[in-house]
Amino acid sequence: MSPYAHITGWGMAVPERVMTNDDIAKMVDTSDEWIQSMTGIRERRIANDEQTTASLAADAARKALNVANLKPADLDLIIVSTSSPEHTFPSTASLVQDRLGAYKAGAFDLLAACTGFIYGVKLATDSIRADAIKNALVIGAETLSRLVNWNDRNTCILFGDGAGAFVLQAAEDTGGVLSSVLRSDGSGAELLSLPGGGSRYPTSPDTLKNGMHYIQMNGREVFRFATRVMAQATEEAVEKANITMDDIHLVIPHQANKRIIEAAARGMNIPIERCYMNLDRYGNTSTASIPIATCEAIQQGRIHPGDKIVFVGFGAGLTWGAAVALWSGPLTTRRIIYPARYRFYARLRSILLRWLRRIDAIIWGRYHNSG
């Protein structure tokens, strides 16, 4: 019998700096009243100069591992879903793997925009169900504030920084991720994009001059797309899990816009109270929004073992998707773990490996030069 992929750990990390709507109104022609009426957002978190996508991801990951009572060495796979990676390569996931000291884990980035966290959960679940791995870490992490044009009031009001993480573990008991639906429609690729910096438009004086390294969005078309697919994906995933919407305790949607979530709730024919929202305090954190919202829902007592939860999102690509989970929480096996010790060992290991590469390069060079 195939094992089930249970969500056994969760964690979030957000910058301390808060940027309010009044702060934005000092930069562009807008107001707190207008932003709240159009989006539901009051404030968002902004990373400082020392914080990066990888550092926020690693902080969220450590908290998730602590909840799951796992050591970094227990991990088999790390997936970082992000729209704002540290580099084109190496992957942000590899940087996180090094920071954690998860020396047995494979690591890669996943790019599916705001839907990416659901894609990552699906891939980790399938790997566990196939009995290929036992423990996976899925992270959504963003520093979108560095990709925003702060002179464009249509986009700068929306986005914030942060990270959230889930630990998924194999277990024989029925539960965990029950079903998922992933979809994409590339014909709408131009509706939400960051054109510059890739191989199609490499960085050049022209791309910089034309603002091609900032997020560009057709807000009206994205709104129409999102309100349609959120309910559609949810209904598909629920049906695939052989349950009904009446069985769902809570829907945790991508936190993009209050009006989109309200429209999706109407499409699902459920009261808005069954959709969790915290975008008023964080804005749109893209891939991080669903795990951050999940962490806060747990803190507020909105999720309990045995509850059936829906995660649903949409994003650039265009992409969308949903997943249904039977919530279980940490596995019953307990043991003593030492988070601070693992963090120290991870740093020490990284330093030693760098020095070993230098020594190896010197020896290799001398040997070949002598030949």
Image: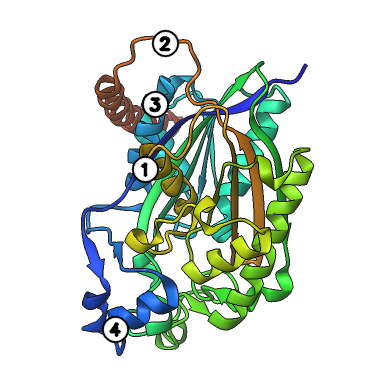
Of the residues under marks 2 and 4, which one precedes in the sequence? 4
Disc assigned to residue 31 = 4
- Observer-side mark, 3 or 4, equals 4
Of the residues under marks 1 and 4, which one precedes in the sequence? 1
Of the residues under marks 1 and 3, which one precedes in the sequence? 1
* Dot 1 alpha-carbon crowd within 10 angstroms: few under 14, some 14 to 19, many 20 or more: many
Residue, disc 3: 67
Residue, disc 2: 334
- Label 2, label 3: how far apart the Cα atoms are: 11 Å
Name the element at disc 4: loop
Amino acid identity at mark 4 = Ser
- Label 2, label 4: how far apart the Cα atoms are: 51 Å
Could you say which is closer to the camera, residue 193 or residue 89?
193
Residue, disc 1: 12
Name the element at disc 2: loop
Is 129 placed left or right of 339 in the picture? right
Q: Position of residue 42 (x, y in %)?
A: 31, 68
Q: Position of residue 165 (x, y in %)?
A: 45, 40
Could you say which is closer to the camera, residue 217 or residue 174?
174
Amino acid identity at mark 3 = Val
Of the residues under marks 1 and 2, which one precedes in the sequence? 1
- When the figure is inspected, residue 256 is found, relative to residue 168, above or below; the finding is below
Name the element at disc 3: helix
Amino acid identity at mark 1 = Met
